[in-house]
Image (cartoon, grey):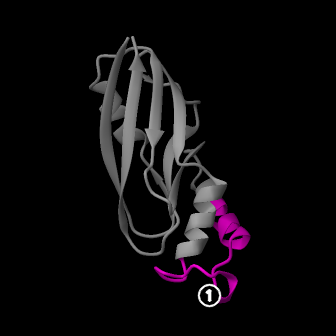
Amino acid sequence: MKQAMGEITCRTSGPGLYEVTGEVCAWTGGQDIRDGLLTVYLPHTSASLLIQENADPDVRADLEDFFSILVARGPANYRHRAEGPDDMPAHIRAALTQTQLSIPFEDGRPALGTWQGIYLFEHRDRPHTRRLKLHLIGE
């Protein structure tokens, strides 16, 4: 059994879904593993990870609109405001989604569906550089 660990970064410019499939596949392509399990982990509390449709951009826009309604911003809504009015809503969004993905790895690539992509879901208003930790284990 072999394993590899790595890291990629994603620069965001505000709320939204940022596809990182290409960067993840570029990293996995450089590893000497053909079949196994890929873990993508995001060590941040105000962003998250999703596997989502990558064909129609309306899906990403609708998801962002839905979360804007579901988790409203506003200083009267939350006690925690240490980093601004988007801070606590970002933590709630991250709690409702996930910070880790486990993806089967087959024939040297993540076993994603035809219309699936790996996305970083940024929940903060200002730009950030997010780190994604990658772990691949297999044969």
Nearest the eye: 49 or 26: 49
Foreground of the two, 2 or 20: 2
Residue 77, position as x, y percentages in the image: 69, 83
Q: Residue at x 59, y 50 (%)?
A: 56
Tell me the residue at 45%/43% (across/down).
Answer: 41
**Is 98 positioned to the left or the right of 14 in the image?**
right
Element at badge 1? helix
Chain part drawn in magenta: 61-86
Name the residue furthest right: 70
User: Label 1, on which residue?
Assistant: 75
Residue most extreme to the front = 79
**Image mark count:** 1
x and y percentages locating residue 49 in the rendered image: 53, 49
Task: Say if residue 104 shows up in the picture.
Answer: yes
Residue 109 picture quarter: top left
Q: Is residue 124 left or right of residue 69?
A: left
- Residue 81: say if magenta: yes
When the figure is inspected, residue 32 is found, relative to residue 44, above or below; the finding is above
Instruction: Tell whether position 105 is magenta.
Output: no
Q: Is residue 58 something one can see in this rendering?
A: no
Residue 4 lies, in percent from the top left, at 32, 26
Pick the front one: 21 or 83: 83
Residue at figure coordinates x 43%, y 51% from the top left? 43
The answer to whether residue 47 is above or below residue 138 is below
Quadrant of the image for the N terminus? top left
Residue under the image location 39 percent in, 10 percent down: 139
User: Which amino acid type is marked by label 1?
Assistant: Pro
- Estimate how packed mark 1 is, as few (under 14), some (14 to 19) or many (20 or more) residues with alpha carbons within 10 Å: some
Where residue 8 sits in the image (x, y, percent)? 32, 45
Residue closest to the far bottom: 76
